[in-house]
Amino acid sequence: MLEEYFGNDATAEEKKRLLAVQAALEISKAAVSSSTANAGIRSQMDLRNVAQEVSSLADAIQDALEESE
């Protein structure tokens, strides 16, 4: 979905960030669409919470990956 966000001139850091954001979005998508997710207004609240936390989750993923280098 975001593969071409930075285009062909993406730096290594931009590529790492993109991978972290994609992972965070996949985790978020799974959390919102899980069988335990509530319908209606609760799902809208879940989506708002996810939207607010994607950046923090991507930061955590990126930090974890950098620690393993």
Image (tube, grey):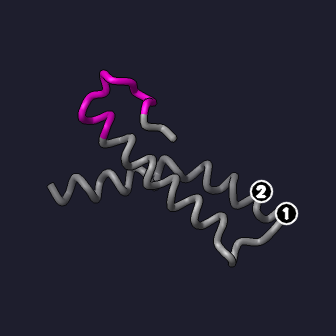
Q: Residue at x 40, y 27 (%)?
A: 6
- Horizontal relation, residue 12 to residue 43: left or right: left
How far across and how far down the image is residue 45, in percent? 75, 58
How far across and how far down the image is residue 38, in percent? 77, 71
Q: Check residue 37 for magenta coloring.
A: no
Q: Residue at x 39, y 41 (%)?
A: 18
Q: Which residue is mark 2?
A: 44
- Placement of 19 over or under 69, stated as above or below: above
- The crowding category of the residue bearing disc 2, from other C-alpha atoms within 10 Å (few below 14, some 14 to 19, many at least 20), is few
Residue extent of the magenta highlight: 4-15
How far across and how far down the image is residue 28, in percent? 56, 59
Q: Which residue is mark 1?
A: 40
Q: Do the residues bearing badges 1 and 2 touch, measured as CB atoms within 8 Å?
A: yes
Along the viewing direction, whichever of 31 and 46 lies nearer the viewer: 31
Q: Residue at x 18, y 60 (%)?
A: 68
- Horizontal relation, residue 2 to residue 64: left or right: right
Q: Secondary structure at mark 1?
A: loop
Q: Check residue 14 for magenta coloring.
A: yes
